[in-house]
Image: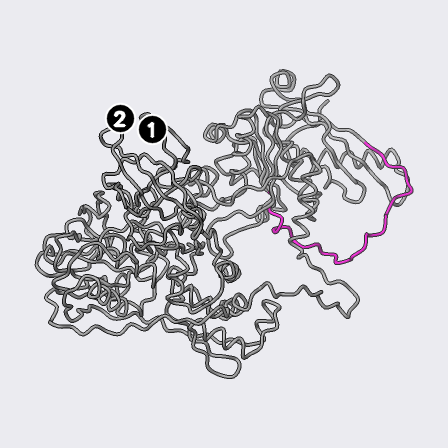
Amino acid sequence: MKFTLSWLKTHLETDASVEAIGAALTDLGLEVEEIADPAATLGAFRIARVIEARQHPNADRLRVCRVEVWDTPGAAPREVQVVCGAPNARTGLVGVFAPPGTHVPGTGVDLKPGVIRGVESNGMLCSERELMLSDDHEGIIELPQNAPLGARYIDWADLNDPVIEIAVTPNRPDALGVAGIARDLAARGLGRAITPDVPPVPGAFPCPVTVTLAPDVAPRACPLFAGRLIRGVTNGPSPAWLQRQLRAIGLRPISALVDITNYITYDRNRPLHVFDADLIKGNALTVAFAAGGERLLALDDKDYAFAPGMLAIRDAGGVESIAGIMGGKPTGCTGATRNVFLESAYWDPTLTAATGRQLRIHSDARYRFERGVDPEFTLPGLELGTRMILDLCGGAASEPVIAGAVPDTARSYPLRPDRVVGLVGMEISTAEQRRILGDLGFSVSGAGPFDVAVPPWRPDIRGEADLVEEVARVASLTKLEAKPLPRSTLGITPQTLTPAQKRAGRVRRALAGRGLNECVTYSFIAQAEAALFGGGGDAARLENPISSEMSHMRPSALPGLVAAAVRNQARGFADLGFFEVGPGFSGGEPGEEEAMAVALRVGETAPRNAYATRRPVDVQDAKADALAGLVAAGAPAERMMLLRDDLPGWLHPGRAGWLGLGPKLRLALIGELHPKTQAAMDLRGPAVACILFPDRIPPARSKATTRPALNVSDYQPVERDFAFVVDARCAAETVLRAARGADKALIARADLFDRFEGPAAEAQLGPGKKSLAISVRLEPSAGTLTEKDIETVAGKIVAAVEKATGGTLRG
């Protein structure tokens, strides 16, 4: 948003410097991006007089001018020679001179002394285009004979007007008008707001153009459409002051009618549009949704096709305007326009934004309507535009024609004066809070809590916290003093982390301790990637994604880790280990997310070296990562079982499983990525992963805060080894669980220490068979075990394993 200092002063009576205004704007939340001083670019151009202009001896279209210049007003003049090609260069002309060393903004050239066709030239007599004042370059600038010689041209022409550019956040559409900015500055105390009221313009005759809102449009898409006919206008160039203001903010003056609508757009945040009334077919305008397929040549000379549901203004001949965004060329105003229809309407922000995005049109009108303009200023905006047209273009105005009504945006919220202290920490008196809100346009009633009515130009105010923010920003957050928090009188520091946060921290440390690198990836991923890992449904789709590659919430962090691994492989890193602790999403509603810890290993287990072995990662590595994380989170590892059903399709079906405390309580998913999944993600090499669900772990039964007493037997432990021939598909966990359960009083531990499987094993043991060897540790507590006791327990172990697996003890 750009505006000049003089423009601001038409709404704000102030003596503050431009520097003070800039500092106040930034402090108010309207960050100043630049304050452009015209003197920096045009300060070197001074008023000078041509003493003599004679024909160039070597060129028909050039003249050699003797120019009398002054370095400062009142100083002694000096004479310089300038070669000039302007047809109006003549003796006695008073113009604008640029000395050598001056940067000419219109050409981008730094002037240097030179020789043109054999004649020396020291400086330049300038045209308006060279000073970027207009597109006119047919001749040099001609000034009145009484212009002050030697003065800076910008001072004499009233061009020394600083241009302020601010960044406006999407929640502050009221700051897209100079009047709204002045309101904020007045509330801060930098002056008095003097924005004039808009008196209605009496109509001289009934409006012959009718306006109709389609039934499905009126409730929301366009609740109000107003307009009036103005006859007998003269659409010539706009006045110099208006052209100067528009050029200062980067707009090109076009014609008086167009310049007026552009001015009001920036002055009051009220976009208007003018139709050439003689080109409206049927003298009737209708606002309706497009059926799809309609086309319009817009004012930017581009042809646009309407999709179904886009809002359009049409006459008897078809579509004439893209509602709230841009008018059409067929009814656009030209120098021949004599009768105009001035439109002022309120357009729905969401629909305007969607249409503009689909058509890829960026206009000042769209920028404002999609953020929200003041609906109650729709009719006053029509009156303001009418008055300016009558003043600058002449003519006679009809009575207004109005379709619909001003939408009801009235709302109020209670504000407790002490809430400012609670939310912001600033002591602001009740009277000052009331004054600030009043100066900002809020209506305040009551003694406390206040009942605060929100003005229609502030669609962002939605509750008490927003009102507190308004008070605090105007009072200035720079006045906020740092104060220590009150000390607790209990003497004990309360816990600041929740149990879930502590559990996540323990899991994070456990996975990092296993050599994995922590990553933080986006929670938004592409729909194809989400679908590959079990997500990608409409429930997890974002309404307004950052990009097409971030359209859905992730089902887990695994897609992001795989993508990170692919990027690392592309840079020559093959052996990788990543993990991330964060949420996965099944939808966008509360309760449709779950805390997860995800680990991924790719490639080999170790780098190549002469003293250690390396192997491709496998599902056992994923299982070890999962168990380490679950144990750190408080899961009972000794009760964990492997479940092979209900596996997702992105895992290898024969090399994956669940770790849980039963079929209904699954705590972790482990496995090798399916080859199709790896191919779809362009991931090379073996890859295994695990996904932990820490919040599913049941709380510990014991609530003791200290370690339990150490219980060690004084009697000699005994270890025995067993080898069983079982089916090749039998899980080792089944054998170990059966062995542990044979005698829970004596058996302290059972571990797998050897596997004999594959073609060689089947040749010895039989088709479809393998051998699993386990070590069982017996720890007596009542006395030393005898050989008979050991044999008895061994028999129980063999019987339990054979019953559970159908296998036999290997001879």
**Residue 5: which quarter of the image?**
bottom left
Q: Inspect the magenta stretch and tell me whether residue 703 lies in it.
A: yes
Percent coordinates x, y for residue 563 in the rendering: 52, 34
Q: Amino acid at mark 2?
A: Asn
Q: Nearer the viewer, residue 130 or 659?
A: 130
Q: Inspect the magenta stretch and tell me whether residue 767 lies in it.
A: no
Residue at x 27%, y 61% (from the top left corner): 221
Point out the image quarter for the N terminus.
Answer: bottom left
Q: Are marks 2 and 1 in contact (CB under 8 Å)?
A: yes
Residue at x 17%, y 47% (from the top left corner): 294
Tell me where the magenta segment starts and ends, as one range: 692-719
516 sits to left or right of 451: right
**Farthest-out residue, left:** 282
Q: Secondary structure at mark 2?
A: loop
Point out the image quarter for the C terminus.
Answer: top right
**Residue 509: which quarter of the image?**
top right
- Give the residue pinned by disc 2: 58
Percent coordinates x, y for residue 259 in the rendering: 26, 56
Kindly identify which numbered label has been placed on residue 119.
Answer: 1
